[in-house]
Image (tube, grey):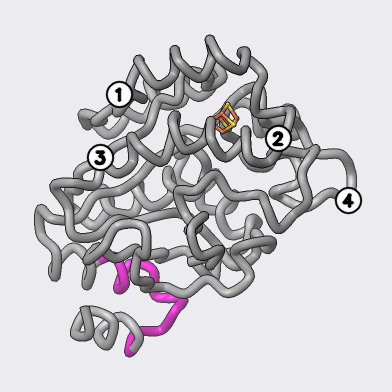
Amino acid sequence: MADIVETIQQKNPNDTVGILGAALDHYGDKIALAMSFQVGGAVLLDMIHRMGREVDVFSIDTGRLPEETYDCAHQITEKYDIKIQWVFPQHDTVEKMIQEKGIYSFRHSVENRKECCGIRKVEPLTRALAPYDAWLTGRRLEQGGTRHALEIVEADPKHEGKIKINPLVKWTVGDLWRYIRQYDVPYNQLYDEGYRSIGCECCTRACKGGEGERDGRWWWEEPEHKECGLHISYTNGSGI
Ligand code: SF4
């Protein structure tokens, strides 16, 4: 990992194309783009496309995504002529959780919410990442909360030996939308209804004036809990 960290750290953090190029050169077919069909991932995919490069794309279908997310995924698939690797939760563990705790168990406690995210997101992510050494995410420092100390390259403590690359770490939400408009990148229509971060339908709502980007996610929880386990270790509590 040291060589790629050094290579990327020597780059201007605002040189997103340079960071992407270095990551794709280094990892070849051992890197993938994780997409949840939010604007960050769409910008990264468009950039890679414009660079004339290709990357594997995977997405986790938790079973509770909004229809608008599938619509966005369909538009992206058509525009970039790509095949998305959809990964689903294990049906037996979902069934067991629902039978034992009900369909809204995640609203009863942080532990239940983490259990649901663990079953529907974290376990599928582990399977999705199995063939790869690194993954690209659209996370940004500006999102705050558990992302206040985000770096461009990070070791992934949940998936030993793998690293995460966050090429948009310095981007603002304004930067993202300027890019989306300039290059006519497909985006999730929920953004037009006031959503600022989009996940499962039942755990996401539109933001009210003055609310931060992540305030519409798990709005009943305290900010320090607002990660689904894809980007934070629940075992040692460290945000990565
Ligand atoms: S965001 Fe909500 S519904 Fe989706 S996996 Fe997490 S707790 Fe479950």
Q: Which residue is mark 1?
A: 78
Q: Amino acid at mark 4?
A: Gly
Establish if 78 lies above or below 208. above
Tell whether label 2 touches label 1 (CB within 8 Å). Answer: no
The front one of 158 and 61 is 158
Q: CA distance from mark 4 to mark 1?
A: 35 Å
Q: Which residue is mark 3?
A: 128
Q: Secondary structure at mark 3?
A: helix
Say which residue label 2 marks: 195
Q: Please, is residue 166 above or below residue 214 in the view?
A: below
Look at the numbered discs 3 and 2 and tell me whether their residues touch, using CB distance below 8 Å.
no
Element marked by disc 1: helix
The picture places residue 132, in percent across and down from the top left corner, at 17, 52
Instruction: Indicate which disc, 3 or 2, sits on the residue closer to the N terminus.
Output: 3
Return the residue at label 4: 210
Secondary structure category for the residue under label 4 = loop
Q: Residue 24: where, in percent of width, then height?
A: 18, 63
**Badge 2, how many Cα within 10 Å: few under 14, some, many 20+?**
many
Residue type indicated by callout 2: Tyr
Quadrant where the N terminus sits is: bottom left
Q: Amino acid at mark 1?
A: Glu
Instruction: Name the kind of residue labelled 3 in the image.
Output: Ala
Is residue 14 inside the magenta stretch?
yes
Q: Please name the residue shown 35% across and 47% down the image.
A: 46
Write down the region rendered in magenta: 10-20
Mark whose residue sits in front, 4 or 1: 4
Q: Residue lying farthest front?
A: 100
Residue 56 lies, with reference to residue 87, above or below; the image says below
